[in-house]
Amino acid sequence: MTTQELMALGERVIMGTYRRFPVVLARGEGSRVWDTEGKEYLDFVGGIAVCALGHCHPAVAEAVSRQVSLLCHVSNLYHIENQILYAAMLIKRSFADQVFFCNSGAEANEAAIKLARKYGNERLGGRHEIITMKGSFHGRTLATVAATGQEKFHKGFQPLPAGFRYVPFNDLDALKEAVNDKTCAVMVEPIQAEGGVNVPDGGYLAGVRALCDEQGILMILDEVQTGMGRTGTMFAHEYEGVTPHIMTLAKALGNGFPLGAMLATSDVASAFEPGSHASTFGGNPLAMAAARATLEIIAAEGFLEGVRERSSYFLEGLRELQRRLPVVKEVRGRGMLLGVELNAEGAEIIDRCREKGLLIASAGPRVLRFVPPLIVTRGEMDRALEILGEVLAAT
């Protein structure tokens, strides 16, 4: 079928939950993808921060290929070797004692919400409310939509599940005022990615943890997009030297293979018991094979240092564009999660970049988001900056 025929068929047979660009991507390698007509693109979307090691990384492909001929799926009624070994790897590199596996970030956050409520009801005298931040994004299930502090995601789905309150991000005073005798947890992203690549002030996360400790409630960190090396450390909260009680991960865990995880300390995790929660496909052998291969590379000596070095290079390039182009209002972010806020709408700029062979995403109508593979090269960053500069200069 031609590209036009494929897109026309897709419009008929797939529900219209996305505004898709007029491109059909067919294959990828590293930081590049090709469409069905053979056009090459630099991919600075990376599946929205998913392909941390780039497309079709040989080690991940080999691990999945090997596993698919051994065992694809068994029920979690049985012990799964890959799942056990990967959970141990995650725990070794994090604050946590135990892991629950699922298939996406929304599912991981759903699990965190359930765990926090069960803990609050059974250990905190019936506390059940969770405070989240305005501008946050936690997923598309009903509970995670309710947890998301953006009204545009709520429209049409009322009545939403109750038990969520919203306060401004990066405002400890507002958070302190919101905590009451019904609060069981505070849920926060270390950096608001979907909400605009908003980086909080230094000390904010530490202040949230201190408040939670003072009030005897839980701190949940949503690291779905910021985790697994995206910000230059394994987890974004490491920059402040704090740890949560619960953390959620997804996106980059399997380098493209669907996978989510909810991690917790043993005390909090013990609120779950057999039957409390489950996931048919969570922690399946194929996903665990992809995840083990991915984590081995990210955790290897020098990898994260390289991410920080490449980030500094790209960040300086973006700031140089800001210095010479008035359309750029602000450059912000950390690691390979970077945002460019504009003094204009960004949709047309994204389209023009795509036409020139650069794929970028948005984080709101005026914020361009850059989440390339963590292995992106200087040459690829130079070319991306060249294309972006040409497009912005013409705006």
Image: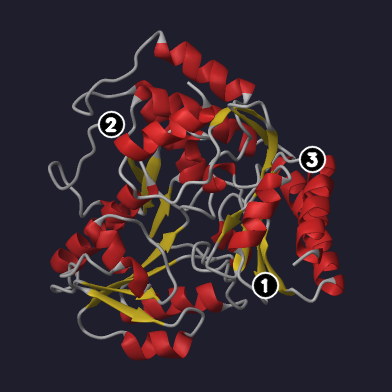
Count neighbours of disc 1 (C-alpha within 10 A) and say few if under 14, some if 14 to 19, many if 20 or more: some
Residue drawn at 51 percent across, 24 percent down: 2
Q: Is residue 41 in view from this perspective?
A: yes
Quadrant of the rendered image containing residue 341: bottom right
Q: Where in the figure is residue 175, as x and y percent of width and height?
A: 40, 84
Distance, label 1 to label 3, CA atoms, is 25 Å
> Quick one: which residue is furthest to the top in this view?
69
Pointer 3 or 2: first along the chain: 2
> SS at mark 1?
strand
Residue drawn at 80 percent across, 53 percent down: 385
Q: Nearer the viewer, mark 3 or mark 2?
A: 3
Residue toward you, 106 or 368: 368
Q: Is residue 336 in view from this perspective?
A: no
Q: Is residue 161 left or right of residue 354?
A: left
> SS at mark 2?
loop
Q: Which of marks 1 and 3 is in front?
A: 1
Pointer 2 or 1: first along the chain: 2
Which amino acid lies under the numbered mark 1 shown in the image of this protein? Leu
Pointer 1 or 3: first along the chain: 1
Read off the residue under disc 3. Answer: 377
Query: How many numbered callouts?
Result: 3
Distance, label 3 to label 2, CA atoms, is 35 Å
Residue toward you, 321 or 25: 25
Which amino acid lies under the numbered mark 3 shown in the image of this protein? Thr
Residue drawn at 72 percent across, 47 percent down: 307
Read off the residue under disc 2. Answer: 281
Query: Is residue 161 depicted above or below 359 in this figure?
Result: below
Which amino acid lies under the numbered mark 2 shown in the image of this protein? Phe
> SS at mark 3?
loop
Q: Where in the figure is residue 150, as x and y percent of width and height?
A: 38, 72
Read off the residue under disc 1. Answer: 342
Q: Where in the figure is residue 45, as x and y percent of width and height?
A: 60, 47
